[in-house]
Image (cartoon, rainbow, N blue to C red):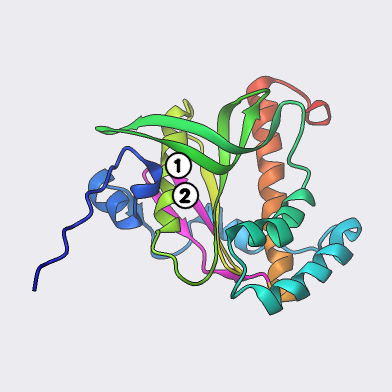
Amino acid sequence: MTNKPKTIKNLSKFEDWTSIDIIKKLGVQKLKEPSPILEKLLNLSGEISPIWSAPIEIQRLSIADNYSFWNETELMNKFISLVMLSISFDHLYYRLYHERWLEAKVKEYLVHGFTDGMLAAGGENPEQPYFFFHEYKKIKGTNADPEGQVLISMIAASELNVKKMPIYGCYVIGKYWCFLVYHENSYSVSTGFDCSNKEELTQIWLILDHINKIVAQKVSEEYNIPIDKL
């Protein structure tokens, strides 16, 4: 029997990184428990904005029935886009960018790629990234490592960040949403929130809304602009 040749990774590309690569090649530590920063995100209380609660509830019932066979485009168009639209991510001085290029030197690796979603300060182009939303994957038939892919983009952003502040991330596989925080060469990741569950979907929304507020505060401080003027 002939052995199948190994696929050679191109570690200059975000898409070829796995979480194991990041731990072994970059010396990044994965924390066994949520960091205090992530723990705060996971224990928020509140409700989805009343303006958006009804349409989000309709799509929650839809994803509960259809998530197992929706492809990436269907998952994005039928559910994720509505949730993201319900958060006021787009402002004059920061916004959610899609399919934008990011590159940075991380140790000996010049890494680069297009990010699915990047919340960053900037105008026509992103300047300072704070949060990455990544990997709109269907639940079956995927070989990629979404944790590794979103994490390498977060680390790249941290290398571009002069003050080395925490970088936030999220990836989606089918109906499950996982949140990450990378800071000071370590990261932690949540368990998956099931967006077909009403209580867990509320928690997803609260986390996204809170990250948006964190970014607004950071942009206000960095650019010396009042929050109500962003």
Q: Residue at x 50, y 32 (%)?
A: 101
The magenta segment: 179-195
Indicate the quadrant containing the N terminus: top left, top right, bottom left or bottom right: bottom left
Q: Which residue is mark 2?
A: 150
Q: Is residue 175 visible?
A: yes
Q: Give the amino acid type for the residue marked by disc 2 in the picture.
A: Val
23 or 17, which is in the foreground? 17
Q: Quick check: 155 left or right of 194?
A: left
Q: Quick check: 205 left or right of 158?
A: right
Q: Residue at x 12, y 67 (%)?
A: 3
Q: Main secondary structure of the magenta part?
A: strand
Q: Which residue is mark 1?
A: 153
Crowd around label 1: few <14 · some 14–19 · many ≥20 (10 Å): many
Task: Spot the residue most to the bottom.
Answer: 65
Callout 2: SS: helix
Residue 146, position as x, y percentages in the image = 45, 57
Residue 177, position as x, y percentages in the image = 58, 63
Circles 2, 1 touching at the beta carbon (< 8 Å): yes
Callout 1: SS: helix
Residue 54, position as x, y percentages in the image = 88, 66
Q: CA distance from mark 2 to mark 1?
A: 5 Å
